Image: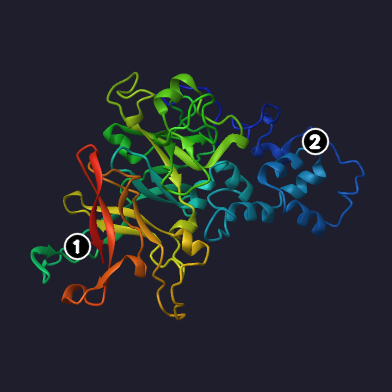
């Protein structure tokens, strides 16, 4: 299949379509070799000691640094300092990279994946794939010089069933999942070969992968932070869903986007750094693929989570990403959110103070599905305990399996296939 079906500029180059029109002639690859650069006039800036000038330039973004490099040879020489570009790269990574290899320089490394460095920066991403969703972990691999992301999976280990004393008809199976990355099939693979990456449809970049031997192809695209004009706000057409706190949401009604509105960002200013899209399609012959643009079932929108949502604290010890056992549906990933009640937020709960080592039990506990199933899909509540403090406690368990555990009132989400007739049923949470 020919990858050059579109001639739009590559989004990984600063000369690409994400630049403002007046900036499209600037390219990181040619900043230091532009023969048209003149020597700087005797400006007070270039008269500064090199150490001070380096300190000033260290406060600039990559695009600003690139623009400074276009002024004159003197500033171009300072702006290509490897320490500056190493800092720009490492600002997006959890662990510092000390060697730009396999690239010649840190500036080349940064330019290769601009403006996609936000993907390894945010690390955790979850998708709106119908029903099941997807949880992936993104990273930059310095050994191969690629940005990649793999599915996070959980495997149920075999454990014997146990009988619950309080109700012998209920069988309890211990749950000790093994969580890992599915390294056999990357979800995202950005590999810059110092040339134009193969294109597919408008605004998309082909991601050549091993799975193409099975006639399955993948493409990556950026998201606009703007919603289509003159359209009402529809929670079902936003990702992440409104139930998950976020200051950054993107529009996901792709049927309308492809036909009525150009969803791809045209400048860095309106590009979202909190979402991206991946299209996967099957193609068995020459010509157009079996799934054409606009079919949302072949397209997944990925959004990230604010770290404070999954980072436990003393006041919110249960907050985080958990694995749940959903029987025939297998393991699913859940975001546990502990929300403050109104009276707790104003400090009028009247509950006794806890010791420094004691777990705080207060507020509500919500389990939101990051991955789902045909009954209760991703982005929906799995269960909610309105009050895990003294006000919601039923009793302390005495039976052997749960001895010492607090049991609180809760509601579980049940629904038929296709999320039909969904309702919250009353139950208890231990």
Q: Residues within 10 Å of mark 2 (few under 14, many from 20)?
A: some
Q: The C terminus lies in which quarter of the figure?
A: bottom left
Q: Quadrant of residue 376?
A: top left
> Residue 309 in the image: x percent, y percent?
45, 57
Q: Position of residue 41 (x, y in %)?
A: 90, 41
Q: Position of residue 125 (x, y in %)?
A: 42, 48
Q: Say which residue label 2 marks.
A: 37
Per the image, label 1 sits on a secondary structure element best described as: loop
Tell me the crowding category of disc 1: few under 14, some 14 to 19, or many 20 or more residues within 10 angstroms, Cα based. Answer: few
**Residue at (41% x, 28% y) in the render:** 254
Q: For this rendering, which residue is in front, 45 or 253?
A: 253
Q: Residue at x 52, y 59 (%)?
A: 94
Using residue 199 as the reference point, say whether residue 268 is left or right of it.
right
Q: Secondary structure at mark 2?
A: loop
Q: How is the image coloured?
A: rainbow
Image side of residue 38 versus residue 117, left or right: right
* Precedes in sequence: disc 1 or disc 2: 2
Query: In the rendered image of this protein, does residue 422 appear above or below residue 53?
Result: above
Residue topped by disc 1: 157
Q: Which mark is residue 358?
A: none
Query: Residue drawn at (27%, 25%), measured in percent from left and top?
Result: 284
Q: Position of residue 216 (x, y in %)?
A: 31, 33
In the picture provided, is 60 more to the left or to the right than 392? right
Q: Point out the image quarter for the N terminus.
A: top left
User: Taking 109 as reference, is 166 left or right?
Assistant: left
Query: Please, which residue is most extreme toward the left here?
Result: 169
Whole-angstrom CA distance, mark 1 to mark 2, is 65 Å
């Amino acid at each position: 299949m020919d990858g050059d079906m579109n001639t739009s500029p590559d989004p990984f180059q600063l000369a690409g379509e994400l630049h403002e029109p007046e900036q499209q002639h600037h390219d990181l690859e040619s900043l230091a070799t532009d023969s048209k650069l003149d020597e700087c006039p005797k400006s007070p800036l270039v008269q500064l000691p090199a150490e001070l000038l380096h300190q000033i330039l260290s406060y600039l973004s990559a695009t600003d640094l690139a623009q400074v490099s276009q002024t004159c040879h003197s500033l171009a020489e300072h702006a290509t300092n490897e320490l500056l570009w190493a800092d720009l790269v490492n600002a997006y990574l959890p662990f510092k990279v000390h060697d730009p290899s396999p690239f010649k320089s840190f500036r080349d490394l940064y330019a290769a994946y601009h403006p996609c460095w936000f993907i390894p920066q945010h690390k955790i991403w979850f998708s709106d794939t119908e029903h099941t969703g997807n949880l992936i972990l993104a990273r930059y691999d310095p050994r191969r010089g690629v940005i990649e992301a793999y599915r996070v999976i959980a495997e149920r280990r075999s454990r014997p069933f146990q009988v619950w004393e309080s109700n012998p008809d209920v069988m309890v199976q211990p749950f000790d999942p093994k969580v890992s990355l599915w390294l056999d099939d990357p979800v995202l693979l950005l590999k810059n070969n110092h040339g134009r990456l193969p294109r597919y449809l408008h605004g998309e970049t082909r991601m050549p992968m091993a799975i193409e031997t099975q006639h399955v192809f993948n493409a990556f695209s950026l998201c606009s932070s703007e919603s289509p004009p003159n359209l009402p706000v529809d929670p079902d057409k936003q990702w992440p869903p409104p139930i998950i706190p976020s200051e950054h949401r993107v529009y996901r009604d792709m049927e309308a986007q492809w036909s009525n509105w150009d969803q791809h960002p045209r400048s860095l200013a309106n590009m979202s750094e909190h979402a991206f899209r991946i299209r996967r399609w099957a193609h068995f012959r020459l010509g157009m693929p079996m799934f054409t643009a606009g079919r949302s079932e072949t397209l997944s929108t990925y959004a990230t989570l604010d770290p404070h949502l999954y980072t436990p604290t003393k006041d919110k010890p249960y907050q985080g990403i958990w694995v749940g056992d959903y029987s025939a549906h297998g393991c699913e990933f859940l975001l546990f959110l502990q929300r403050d009640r109104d009276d707790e937020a104003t400090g009028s709960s009247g509950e006794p103070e806890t010791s420094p080592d004691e777990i705080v039990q207060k507020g509500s506990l919500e389990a939101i599905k990051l991955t789902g199933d045909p009954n209760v899909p991703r982005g929906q509540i799995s269960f909610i305990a309105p009050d895990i403090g003294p006000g919601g406690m039923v009793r302390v368990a005495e039976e052997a399996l749960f001895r010492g555990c607090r049991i609180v009132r809760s509601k579980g989400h049940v629904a038929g296939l296709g999320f039909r007739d969904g309702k919250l049923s009353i139950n208890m949470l231990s």
